[in-house]
Image: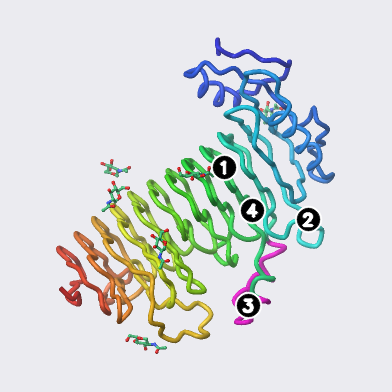
Amino acid sequence: MGCLKLRRHVVISLLLAIVVAADCATGGALTIFNVLRYGAAGNGRSDDSPAFLRAWEAACKGNPTKNIPVVYVPPNRTFLLTPLAFLGPCKSQRIYVLMSGKLIAPVKREWKGSPDAWIQFFGINGLVMKGKGVIDGQGSTWWPDNTCRNDPDPAKGVACKGPYGMMFRNCDGLRLKGFSKINGPGSHIKITKANNTVISNLWIIAPGDSPNTDGIDITSSTDVQIRNSFIATGDDCVAINAGTSNVYVTGITCGPGHGISIGSLGHGGGNDTVENVHVRNCTLKGTLTGVRIKTVQGGKGYARNISFKGIKFEAVDNPIQIEQFYCPLKVNCRNYTSAIAVSDVSFVGISGTSVAQNVINLNCNQLFGCKNIRLDRVYIQPSIAGNKVSATCNNAHGKATHTRPMVNCFLP
Ligand SMILES: *[C@@H]1O[C@H](CO)[C@@H](O)[C@H](O)[C@H]1NC(C)=O
Ligand SMILES: *[C@@H]1O[C@H](CO)[C@@H](O)[C@H](O)[C@H]1NC(C)=O
Ligand SMILES: *[C@@H]1O[C@H](CO)[C@@H](O)[C@H](O)[C@H]1NC(C)=O
Ligand SMILES: *[C@@H]1O[C@H](CO)[C@@H](O)[C@H](O)[C@H]1NC(C)=O
Ligand SMILES: *[C@@H]1O[C@H](CO)[C@@H](O)[C@H](O)[C@H]1NC(C)=O
Ligand SMILES: *[C@@H]1O[C@H](CO)[C@@H](O)[C@H](O)[C@H]1NC(C)=O
């Protein structure tokens, strides 16, 4: 710790060493902004949001030195935060949030402020949030109402969506590492309009029957890595949405949940594009779907250059799916004359078991089809001995080699 130069006398927990170690390499010294010094009580009852915002303001806007500011959330305390937004830009090129303690959200009936998200970060470049802390959205007070999101009446549907647990918007160079994000009211972590994001070693956990609790949602972003994390929720473990490119997902253990999804794309006739998504070495256990691409009718863009390699399934339902007729609310599911084009998708080195019979389902649009779909070394067995497994395609063009079940439904 020889390179550590602190501007304030603080108790440095061992956890701080994580941050320090990361910065010795670059020679950066740190200035600590402990939320307790800015008035946080950490008793789990009084609202610590004003104190957190003061600490943030000091670290982000007021830090007069060349040191890297660290907003420090100390261990062994529980901080109640009402919905709040941390705003950039900051003076320094990097800023840390060291999460050692626990954050909790208000229960639904005490929710004040933004209905969109609990903790928001806007326009902050070089934000690094790490530590072994726990961020608890207390979602159980929201979930009973979330199911009405599936109401065909869109107005009602939106009203029933729980807020995002954490939302990062326009944050370039974002790093999230090590903490637990649990029981989100809605999706746990949403990242949008960001370049160069690395997410690693997170634990994202909510009950399998908690509605609409995606693990990680990415939209409108480029260069995203999601690595070595455990995600068990009531919806998609990872959802990659419109406007996203260059995504690497590796070493994710997912389940329960709805698997790893691209889309859904093309809502409201949108020109949605997703490309260069590569999923490697992930395990899906007991999920409702495995790996899938879903697009709704009437969209305009594309999903292309997507690969899934080294995937293991354990008792997964619908393990491999491309669905160009996605229509979750089952209303206005008519056929349109435009569709999101799906091409250059490969499923390679995939094995495991499924509770479904139709384990590979490539259901593509009659006008555009799906082009250059490749399956190689894909072996999926029934999870119950004696059951049969099969593959189906509609309008899918591509090639299958070494697969069980046999895939002989491709068009050339
Ligand atoms: C937090 O609690 C743990 C376990 O009780 C204890 O070992 C540790 O010293 C505490 N840390 C601080 C900073 O109080
Ligand atoms: C990300 O990079 C693109 C292209 O280089 C740039 O136009 C955009 O402003 C960047 N995003 C942010 C949030 O800075
Ligand atoms: C859709 O967006 C892509 C990428 O931004 C663009 O290249 C393409 O021209 C757009 N297509 C339509 C039909 O607007
Ligand atoms: C597919 O994605 C990879 C990784 O992002 C990239 O290197 C490659 O050039 C892409 N291929 C095409 C045809 O765009
Ligand atoms: C995936 O696992 C294989 C075999 O263990 C390993 O060789 C490869 O480097 C891993 N790929 C990634 C991207 O982690
Ligand atoms: C849309 O077209 C597909 C493929 O031709 C067909 O299977 C499906 O029944 C049609 N759906 C509707 C709602 O017309």
Where residue 300 sits: x, y (%)? Answer: 41, 70
Question: How far apart are labels 4 and 1 at the CA level?
Answer: 16 Å
Residue 171's disc is: 1
What whole-number distance in Å separates the C-alpha atoms at marks 1 and 3?
A: 30 Å
Q: Residue at the spot x=34%, y=70% of the render?
A: 322
What residue sits right under mark 2 in the picture? 113
Q: Is residue 213 left or right of residue 339?
A: right
Q: Amino acid at mark 2?
A: Gly
- Residue at disc 1, CB closer than 8 Å to ligand 2: yes
Q: What is the magenta range?
A: 140-156
Front-most of residues 130 and 354? 130
Q: Which mark is on residue 165?
A: 4
Find disc 3 in the rendering and name its residue: 154
Q: Relative to 270, is 237 above or below?
A: above
Q: Secondary structure at mark 4?
A: strand
SS type, badge 3: helix
